[in-house]
Structure formats: structure tokens, C-alpha cells
Amino acid sequence: MRTPFRIALISAAGCVLAACNALPGSGPHSGDIAQADGRASELGARIEVVDVTDAVARRLLASHHAMSFAEGLGDKPAPEERVGAGDSVQVTLWEAPPATLFGAPVAATPGMPSTSQAIGLPEQAVGLDGTIAVPFAGRVQAAGRTTREIGDDITRRLSAKANHPEAVVRIASNRSSMVTVVGEVGASQRVPLTAGGERLLDALAAAGGVRQPVNKTTIQVTRGERWFTESLDRVIRDPRQNVPLHPGDVVTAMYQPLSFIALGATGKQDEINFEAQGVTLAQALARANGLVDTRANVQGVFVFRLEAADALDWPRQPVATTPDGLVPVIYRIDLRDPRSFFVMQSFAMNDKDILYIANSPTAELQKFLNIVFTLTYPLVQINNTLK
């Protein structure tokens, strides 16, 4: 080979070697990620790289467990219905004959038994002060009491004025014992609770059902200052989660398309949605069309995630944290170990996780050799032609 072409060939090879670190790629190599565990980050501490084992998967599953509706709200029915301000009630009064206070006296018919007299008072709303007006009984406290307690109070007040009176009270219009249903439902509304004891699915049905697919809908129930969430799919499948509702509960149907991002040597690089009940790492890999055989490093399967500070017992302190107190963690799993396929079935993916598959070293070598061949082959051809 002539000296000028030898020099050109050596120069081209040298340029390729100098640019080895600039080879095209879809992300960091496995070694680069492993080294991140020992380098200080811009966050002020080292990034945690955690090998996923059965113990780690179990710890994460326990730390991410949220109380279900059955655990947080219980199966205790709503307390006995009580009248509240704004409710409309109807009072019916009975008086034994001869009736002297309500209605006209009725003369007894020979041979026929005497009958009691009844009078129904017009419906009236319970005032802001919680009272209703009853003739000859005055203002009677109604709010916070059951209909039986109100009737007994009216009877007691009239006992010295009427002939063996009896009072029966019923709620004509319920405006205080209500559940509010909002969000992705057919029609947001307030649903009245009855003595039948409405449950969660009853309230959703009364609001016209949900507008989004069941497996992508999350239900939140707020009771007082506490709130709990559960996927609608689980509420339907598990009767224990169809809990009784209490007055004042707020039921919110939320459409929350959860997703993870698949990058690297996967069959599908995309943001992939998953159901409200969640997916495991094994399912996530399947939805990303698995690993690309010609590129993927089976020892380089990683999940990038921001974890709560108490998710694991971190091996070193201090750990890197974001401004909102989350810990950047890289979970690593080795698919050469057959046991890892069982671990993946209990490792749950979180919303906004990044699933990354690194390229194998042989794939990097192949890319390097392709570049060398592309640059040197024309020079060799030219040299052969000149010879």
C-alpha cells in the first residue's frame, strides 16, 4: 500500500477511535448507569442504583400500599337518618275522640266504635335555627334529631292540651343527608341518602354512571378531612370496596390515564398508558414489545423513578433529593437470572416511570466496526484501483 494511502487509512482509523465515545445511541450504557451510584449528582448527593430483589419488591409493594375503601371507610352503615336544616317535613297529628283540639268533634254513632281524628299539617322546611312550627306546641327543635324523637317531643307538648294525642313525622324532602357526586360522571349532582343505606355504586348509578372506561377511572371518596382512592374496576370486582356512604361524603370520579415511558432497546419506544389498577414490570416489558434481541443487554434493564424518602432503607446518607423531597432512584434487574422473572411480577410500575433497556456491548462493537468499515473501505478500493 502506498505511503499516502497508508497515512490516510491510519488517520481515518485514528479519528474513529477518538470518536468511540460519540457513537450513536439511545441512552447511557449499563456501565455509565452503574457509575452514577458512586458519583455526586447536581442534587448534592449520589444517585441510588438499587438491584431489584424479592425483598426490595416486597418492601416497595408495602410502602406504596394505600388503604382501600374497605380498610379506610369500613362497612359500617350510615347512622340513623336525622333531620337537618333545609329538609322539608310533614307532621300528622292524631287525637282520640272526642277530639277537642284538632278538627270538629264527631258524635259517636250507636253501635259503631269511636274513631280517632287525624290532621295533616302542611309541609314545612326546617329553618336555619333548626326548628319547625307546630300549632299549640310552638317551635319544636327538629335539626339533629330523628323523626321519632321529633314526634315524641310534639306528643309530649300536646298531651296536656289534646285528648290522647299522637304525632308522626316524616321527611318529605331530604336536603341535608346528601352525597355529592362529581367528576367524570353522566351528571354531577347531590344524591339523597335514604334509610335503605345507599352504597358507592348506587351513588354513581344515580349520577348517570361514569363517562370514561371503567379500567381507566379512579374513584375518590372524601369523608371529613380524610380521602381514599381506588380504581373503579376493583370496586366492581370486589364487593367489599362498595362501601356504604355517609351524609356529607364527596364521591369524585377521575379519569387519570397513568403511563410509563419505554426507551432504549425495546420493541416500542413510546409513552404507554396503563389501567388504574396498575401493571407490573413484567407487563410493562410485554407492552413495550419486549427486548430487541440484536441490541438489548439483558443485564441492563432499568426503571428510573422518583421515590418518597421513606420508600427504602437507603444504604448511604445523605441521598440525593429533589426540591420537593423525592429521591431519584434507578432500579436495576438482571434478566439472565431466571428468578428475576418472578420478581418482575411483584414489582409494580408507578405513573411516569421510565423503563430503559441499555444496548449490549456487542451491539456497541458492531456499530463501531460498521463506522470503521464505512470510512476505510473507500480508501482501500481507491488503493486497489491505483495498483
Image: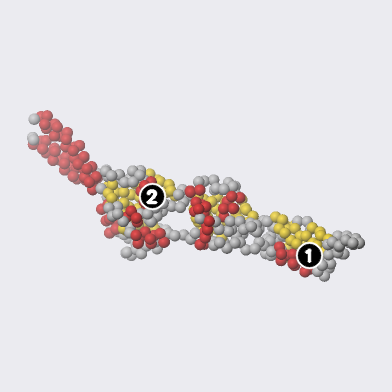
What is the quadrant of residue 383 in the picture? top left
Residue 368 at x, y percent in the picture: 21, 43
Percent position of residue 98, x then y:
87, 64
For the N terminus, the image quarter is: top left
Q: Quadrant of the C terminus?
A: top left
In primary-sequence order, the first of circles 1 and 2 is: 1
| Residue type (three-letter) at the residue carrying disc 1 | Glu
Judge whether 338 appears above or below 155 on screen.
above
Q: Residue at x 68, y 56 (%)?
A: 174
Residue at horizontal 48 percent and vertical 49 percent from the top: 215
Residue 337, position in %: x, y?
28, 55
Residue at image x 29%, y 49%? 358
Whether residue 82 is visible to the viewer of this picture, yes or no, is yes
Please say if 358 is above or below 47.
Answer: above
Q: Nearer the viewer, residue 229 or 139?
A: 229
Badge 2, how many Cα within 10 Å: few under 14, some, many 20+? some
Q: Amino acid at mark 2?
A: Gln
| Inter-mark Cα distance, 1 to 2 | 67 Å
Q: Which residue is mark 1?
A: 166
Percent x, y for residue 54? 34, 60
